[in-house]
Amino acid sequence: MKPKRTILCVDDNEQSLSHRKIMLETRGYRVASFSRGEEALARFTQGGVDLVIADMAMPGLDGPQLIAKIKDLSPHTPAILISSKVRIYDHDSQADVFLTKGMYAPVDLLERVRLLLVRKRGPKRMQQQPRSPQIARQIGAA
């Protein structure tokens, strides 16, 4: 069985955070959820986070600031920024994906998560079967 991927979810709206957490956990992901960016950053520095989903507007450390700090620590960690008020071209961010609340279906978020995790992992490499010494000699003689 392959290990579960850990997703860091951050949103100051407890209801949105709860829905996102349940949706991701039912798909087999581990979810570390936080309502403040500072707490999420502290958890991220402990390691083991595969992807970050953050709300844009939060008190204290907001989504774009959190993602910038995470990308400084780990540039290859994928990040999704979600907002109810701002379109992608209205704000500069280091997020890999921007989604507007209410404008995407839950299945769209799940597919974005899956694709970002696949991209982070990279393509599967072909496993070479170990050659027996006899076959290695035959290949070398040819």
Image (cartoon, rainbow, N blue to C red):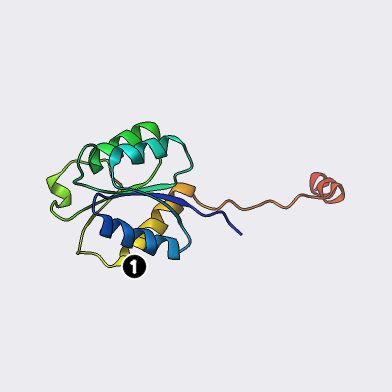
The residue carrying pointer 1 sits among few (fewer than 14), some (14 to 19) or many (20 or more) residues within 10 Å by Cα, namely: few
- From the viewer's perspective, tell me whether residue 126 is left or right of residue 105: right
Residue at image point 79% right, 50% down: 131
Q: Residue at x 20, y 59 (%)?
A: 101
Front-lying residue, 51 or 92? 51
Rendered view: 130 above or below 1: above
Q: Which residue sits at x=48%, y=42%?
A: 48
Residue 60's place in the image compared with 18, above or below, is above
Which residue lies at the image location 24% right of the left edge and 49% below the top edge?
12
At label 1, the amino acid type is: Val
Image position, residue 89 (x, y; %): 14, 48
> Where in the figure is residue 44, as x and y percent of width and height?
40, 39
Image quadrant holding the N terminus, namely: bottom right
User: Which residue is disc 1 drawn over?
Assistant: 107
- 126 or 91: nearer the eye? 91
Q: Is residue 117 above or below residue 103?
A: above
